[in-house]
Amino acid sequence: MIKRSNNYCVIMAGGIGSRFWPLSTHKFPKQFQDILGTGRTMIQQTYGRISSIIPDENIFVITNKEYTELCRAQLPNVPEYNIVGEPMIKNTAACNLYMIYKIALQNPSANIIVLPADHLILNEARFLEKAELGFALAASHEYLITLGISPSRPDTGYGYIQYLPSGDSGYYKVKTFTEKPSVELAKSFIESGDFLWNAGIFLWNVKVILTSYQKYLPEMVQQFSSCEFNNGKEKNCIELIYPKLTKVSIDHAILEKADNVYVIPADLGWSDLGTWTSVYENADKNEDNNAINSRNILTYNSGNNIICVKNKNKAAIIDGMEDYIVVDTDKALLICPRENDQLIKKYINDLKKLKKGNKFL
């Protein structure tokens, strides 16, 4: 494929991945881990699929400043100055505007694809095909574009995009966004046939998205406009303005309000790998439907479990367990029913209350 000089990528890699505790920790979050045992970490897979159509010098990574060295170690082909650390977490509106300013200064005609670092995409050829369509639309229309996934179940953990079916262009105007609906509402969405999951993958031209920021987040634009970018003054100014920025997602602040949002339906074999259950669903399994990550794990009278042992030289024996999550690391052991994976954040909050509990996180 041709790598076009006006096309850029921003990989968002600043999350903590708390729902993947105890494997994912504050110091080593899930995007830097090989969750599925493929031989590549999640961020390496994300970089690998987009680097076939975008040159390394046009790939940027925005992460927490604590993780810049991890990013550089895992993505050695990305220029060091393209890996940018935020001084604090401010959600996706701030990190995207930061990258827009940096990229626009390099190339005022840039078209950008925004990718979360920790998503699974099994059909990479189709992903690249849809990305190329998105880039073509961003270059020729004043559109804000998102990729939508055909829902396979009434999942309440995803956002939904309703679109206006018209013709067979491969892209459609967005009508509404709904964030994490009830089960009943999610079922009605799937029955209607005109709803997609919001994959959090976006494409736009820098001028078009900046115009949207000026309309919907003028104060944030003013704050970033006070900085100089791509020089020695950038870091100090960013440190100064970040505490003042509104903490809001780009979905809520802009996409839900704008009238020029379009969606490209894309069946990509996609998962956001947001929970241990989603990892179980996408992992290889043995004859008892156990997903295990080491040959030194033996199971008896046990099925439908996900068992992850960080120390591959450690033996584990599991007997009489069904539908459980078992994760063993150097500092912590988690054993809970798979149906309780949404309670992991509660477990973490309770751990924090223990004396020196933070050392386990």
Image: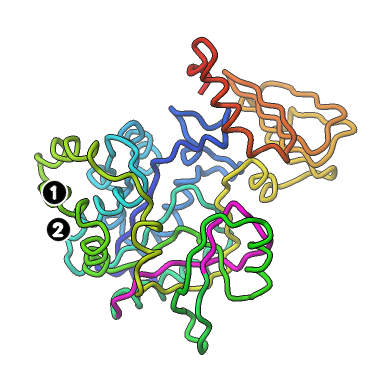
Q: Which mark is residue 248?
A: none
In x, y percent, where is residue 191? 68, 72
Front residue of this view, candidates 119 and 186: 186
Query: Disc 1, disc 2: CB below 8 Å?
Result: yes
Up-down: is 97 above or below 358? Answer: below
Q: Is residue 245 left or right of residue 115?
A: left
Task: Please name the residue shown 61% across and 33% down the image.
Answer: 344
Mark carried by residue 105: 2
Residue 153 visible in the shown view: yes
Under mark 1, the amino acid is: Phe
Q: Residue furthest right?
A: 301
Q: Does label 1 or label 2 sit earlier along the sequence?
A: 2
Q: Determine if the magenta segment contains residue 26.
A: no
Q: Which of the colour schemes (rainbow, by chain, secondary structure, one colour) is used? A: rainbow
- Considering only vertical position in the picture, is 29 above or below 152? above
Q: Where does residue 288 sit, x and y in percent of width and height?
A: 84, 42
* Point 56% across, 54% down: residue: 180
What SS does tag 1 mark? Answer: loop
At 16% across and 48% down in the image, what residue appears?
A: 223
Q: Which residue is mark 1?
A: 229
- Look at 66% across and 68% down and name the residue there: 188
Q: Is residue 144 magenta?
A: yes
Task: Give the camera-side residue of 328 and 91.
Answer: 91
Q: Position of residue 13 (x, y in %)?
A: 40, 44
**In the rendering, at what x and y percent does residue 39 appear?**
55, 42
Label 2 element class: helix
Q: Image height check: is 338 above or below 348?
A: below
| Amino acid identity at mark 2 | Leu
Q: Which residues are magenta?
A: 141-161
Instruction: Determine crowd level at label 2: few under 14, some 14-19, many 20+ residues with C-alpha closer than 10 A.
Output: some
For disc 1, the neighbor class at 10 Å (few under 14, some 14 to 19, many from 20) is: many
> In front here: 281 or 155?
155
